[in-house]
Amino acid sequence: MRWSLISLMAAAVLAVTRAYTTVPAAGIALVPASPRELLAVLRVTALPAPHRGLAHVLAWSAWRRHHQHQAAQAHRRWNNVIAEVTA
């Protein structure tokens, strides 16, 4: 749900930005903004900068390794179940 809302907001920002960039300002002829340029504008104006402090990076690393451990255990359990059923 959250990512759907963010996607809709991003599409709206890109549409408005595209509309403003296609109208010439003060008689100056401009090439329409490219998708990469619109994305750069979106990143600067609407998206917050990622938090990359040391504590955050270490917490993320611990979460990731814990998640990988849990996934590996689940795969091992599933493989044991399949091995018992097929044996």
Image (cartoon, grey):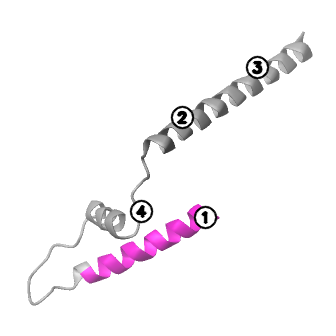
Characterize the local packing of mark 3: few (<14), some (14-19) or many (20 or more) Cα atoms within 10 angstroms. Answer: few
Numbered badge on residue 48 = 4
Label 4 and label 3: CA atoms lie apart by: 39 Å
Residue located 60% across and 30% down the image: 65
Q: What residue type is labelled 2?
A: Ser
Q: Is disc 4 placed on a helix, strand or loop?
A: loop
Mark before the other along the chain sequence, 4 or 3: 4
Q: Mark 2–mark 1 contact, CB under 8 Å?
A: no
Question: Picture quarter containing residue 47?
Answer: bottom left
Label 2 and label 3: CA atoms lie apart by: 23 Å
Which x, y percent locates residue 17? 32, 77
Q: What residue type is labelled 1?
A: Arg
Label 2 and label 4: CA atoms lie apart by: 21 Å
Numbered badge on residue 61 = 2
Label 3 and label 1: CA atoms lie apart by: 33 Å
Identify residue for label 1.
Answer: 2
Label 4 and label 1: CA atoms lie apart by: 15 Å
Question: Picture quarter containing residue 32?
Answer: bottom left
Which x, y percent locates residue 86? 88, 14
Question: Picture quarter containing residue 25?
Answer: bottom left
Q: Nearer the viewer, residue 52 or 5?
A: 52
Q: Examine the structure image and report whether residue 64 is included in the region drawn in magenta.
A: no
Mark before the other along the chain sequence, 4 or 1: 1
Mark before the other along the chain sequence, 2 or 4: 4
Residue located 83% across and 16% down the image: 80
Residues rendered magenta in the picture: 1-20
Dominant secondary structure of the residues highlighted in magenta in the image: helix
The residue at the far top in this view is: 87
